[in-house]
Image: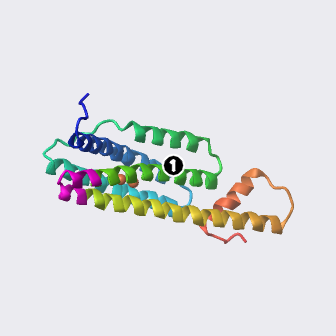
């Protein structure tokens, strides 16, 4: 285990950490895209997978510029974030609820990345490596965009679901099976109003 005695050591260690984290995400994101019910969310995960692959490539550029081999160090933080998200997703039966849960889990991941790239950018600048700092800045901006995209989707969901619940209350008071209710919600999330 190398010792961390200087900012240069910290920078190197943190780059290895996020390199591994990004690689874990290239495996996790396709699974999220597959499980997402709302098309908009599915698309957001697919698009962020492409960006994540670019983040991996950008980090390889960083390793290259710093004269280091492109080698990661197991990022336990990301490992646990992904595991926690997967456990919760496995327990959510309702499609719209599962989508909301996946957004929450993905945003925790984005915030981890935002914190890391923000730190890396500052450290690289302090250590007189502005070209490397620019690469971190590029990724940082994309992580922030991905995070706000997820916020937008979450907000449109909440509104749609609230509207749907209200409509259901007005339409009839008949009790309906739980399954039918969740299907109606899924339809509302899609934005399709064909059935009504
Ligand atoms: Fe990333
Ligand atoms: Fe990301």
Is 89 inside the magenta-drawn segment?
no
Q: Position of residue 152 (x, y in %)?
A: 53, 65
Q: How is the image coloured?
A: rainbow
Residue 150 placement (x, y as % from top left): 50, 60
Q: Is residue 92 left or right of residue 67?
A: right
Comparing 112 with 174, the one in front is 112
Write the start and end of the magenta stretch as one range: 122-134
**Magenta highlight: main SS:** helix
Left or right: residue 149 versus residue 38 is left
Quadrant of the frame with the N terminus: top left
Badge 1 crowding class, 10 Å Cα cut-off, few under 14, some 14 to 19, many 20 or more, is some
- At 73% from the left edge and 71% from the top edge, which residue is drawn? 196
In the rendered image, the vertical position of residue 89 relative to residue 158, given as above or below: above
User: Residue 128 in magenta?
Assistant: yes
State the image quarter where residue 6 is shown. Answer: top left
What residue appears at the point 36 percent right and 48 percent down from the top-left corner? 26
The local secondary structure at tag 1 comes to: helix
Question: From where the camera sits, is residue 43 visible?
Answer: no
From where the camera sits, is residue 123 visible? yes
* Label total for image: 1
Q: Report x, y in % for residue 121.
A: 28, 55
* Residue marked by disc 1: 105
């Amino acid at each position: 285990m190398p010792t961390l005695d200087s900012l240069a050591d910290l920078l190197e260690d943190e780059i290895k950490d996020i390199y591994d984290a990004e690689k874990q995400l290239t495996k996790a994101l396709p699974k999220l895209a597959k499980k997402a019910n709302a098309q908009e969310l599915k698309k957001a995960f697919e698009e962020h997978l492409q960006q994540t692959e670019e983040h991996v490539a950008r980090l390889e550029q960083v390793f290259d510029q710093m004269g280091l081999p492109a080698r990661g160090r197991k990022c336990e933080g990301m490992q646990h974030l992904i595991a926690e998200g997967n456990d919760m997703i496995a327990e959510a039966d309702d499609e719209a609820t599962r989508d909301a849960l996946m957004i929450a889990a993905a945003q925790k991941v984005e915030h981890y990345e935002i914190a890391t790239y923000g730190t890396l950018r500052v450290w690289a600048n302090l250590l007189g490596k502005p070209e490397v700092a620019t690469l971190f800045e590029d990724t940082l901006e994309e992580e922030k965009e991905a995070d706000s995209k997820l916020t937008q989707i979450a907000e449109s969901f909440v509104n749609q679901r609230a509207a749907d619940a209200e409509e259901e209350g007005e339409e009839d008071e008949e009790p309906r099976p739980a399954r039918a209710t969740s299907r109606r919600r899924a339809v509302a999330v899609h934005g399709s109003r064909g059935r009504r």
